[in-house]
Amino acid sequence: MFEINHQTVLVTGATSGIGQQVAQDYAKKGWNVVACGRNQAKLAELALKFPNIATLAFDITDAKACREALSGLEPCPTLWVLNAGDCEYIDDGVMDAALFRRVITVNVIGLSNCIEAIQDQFTAGHRLAIVGSISSELALPRAEAYGASKAAVKYLAHTLRMDLAAKQVHVSAIFPGFVETPLTDKNNFAMPMIISVEQASKSLIDGLSKGKSNLYFPRRFTSIIRLLGTLPYSWQHALIGRLLKQP
Ligand SMILES: NC(=O)c1ccc[n+]([C@@H]2O[C@H](COP(=O)([O-])OP(=O)(O)OC[C@H]3O[C@@H](n4cnc5c(N)ncnc54)[C@H](OP(=O)(O)O)[C@@H]3O)[C@@H](O)[C@H]2O)c1
């Protein structure tokens, strides 16, 4: 049962990985949590474990389903963590347009569906936290689709920050490096300085509680990637190959 005087956070992608940990950690802190995803069994597990977690099952790529699930939430969340996303890689430099469309549809169109569905509920002081990726800062091998989607997410977050400022709605853009989740479990390349979901969730929650506009974690890895991103492209391409070589 939701406590009316407690803060409420909505988390998309709460059935796995970073989002699941973030939802649980906010619940442990006493927040009311609205956990979203498609996996009904995982949502039921969360609701069973935490009385202060309510759940919403919908596919973010379905605009109508987003509107139906997300309109008129009571109590209204003051923090919206839009984290749901997916990753697929291009193989051997061979473009796969269907794969490209799938990744863009979830990571970009799905995100815009969620924002459209919740925007009527934004009021002064609310925070929108949008989970991008450090891959938006540097071209990475095989990440034609994923990197392009996260570059779009970064642009969307930064633009929205300017456009929502007049309503005093804050936008935080989140740039994780590698985090151990089902999404990265399938990677067969080196993932330097990979962190646990617990560490990622702590960085995210701490950063948002401090009102940070841009969150980069883990700090050392994301600083290296951001520094590489400032170098001439020929240097970037040479150095990134070494950083992510097969283990
Ligand atoms: N792990 C990393 O190293 C890393 C690094 C940088 C950025 N990120 C970003 O962090 C976010 C979370 O990633 P993760 O690693 O935690 O991945 P994950 O474990 O695979 O979790 C992805 C979550 O997104 C949800 N989701 C995916 N497609 C959806 C759809 N069509 N409709 C509704 N929900 C959907 C999934 O829920 P259902 O399956 O229940 O729908 C799941 O809860 C993503 O945006 C990812 O790009 C991750």
Image (tube, rainbow, N blue to C red):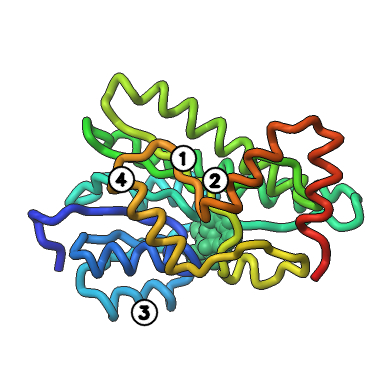
| Viewer-side label of 4, 1 | 1
The amino acid at mark 2 is Gly
Query: In x, y percent, where is residue 195?
Result: 54, 66
Q: Is residue 245 left or right of residue 201?
A: right
In which quadrant of the rendered image does the C terminus lie? bottom right
Label placed on residue 117: none
Q: In the rendered image, which quarter is residue 58 located in?
A: bottom left
Do residues under tags 1 and 3 come within 8 Å of each other at their CB atoms?
no
Q: Secondary structure at mark 3?
A: helix
Query: In x, y percent, where is residue 94?
Result: 91, 50
| Residue on which disc 3 sits | 45
Label placed on residue 71: 4
In which quadrant of the rendered image does the N terminus lie? bottom left
Q: CA distance from mark 4 to mark 1?
A: 23 Å
Label placed on residue 173: 1
Look at 43% across and 69% down and name the residue there: 198
Q: CA distance from mark 1 to mark 3?
A: 29 Å
Circle nearer the N terminus (2, 1): 2
**Mark 2 beta carbon near ligand 1 (under 8 Å):** yes
| Viewer-side label of 3, 4 | 3
Circle nearer the N terminus (1, 3): 3
Residue 34 sits above or below residue 143 on the image: below
Do residues under tags 2 and 1 come within 8 Å of each other at their CB atoms?
yes
Circle nearer the N terminus (4, 2): 4
Residue 145 sits above or below residue 247 on the image: above
Q: CA distance from mark 3 to mark 2?
A: 27 Å
Report the front residue among 37 and 204. 204
Circle nearer the N terminus (3, 2): 3
Please tell me how crowded label 4 is: few (under 14), some (14-19), or many (20+) other residues with Cα within 10 Å: some
| Viewer-side label of 1, 3 | 1
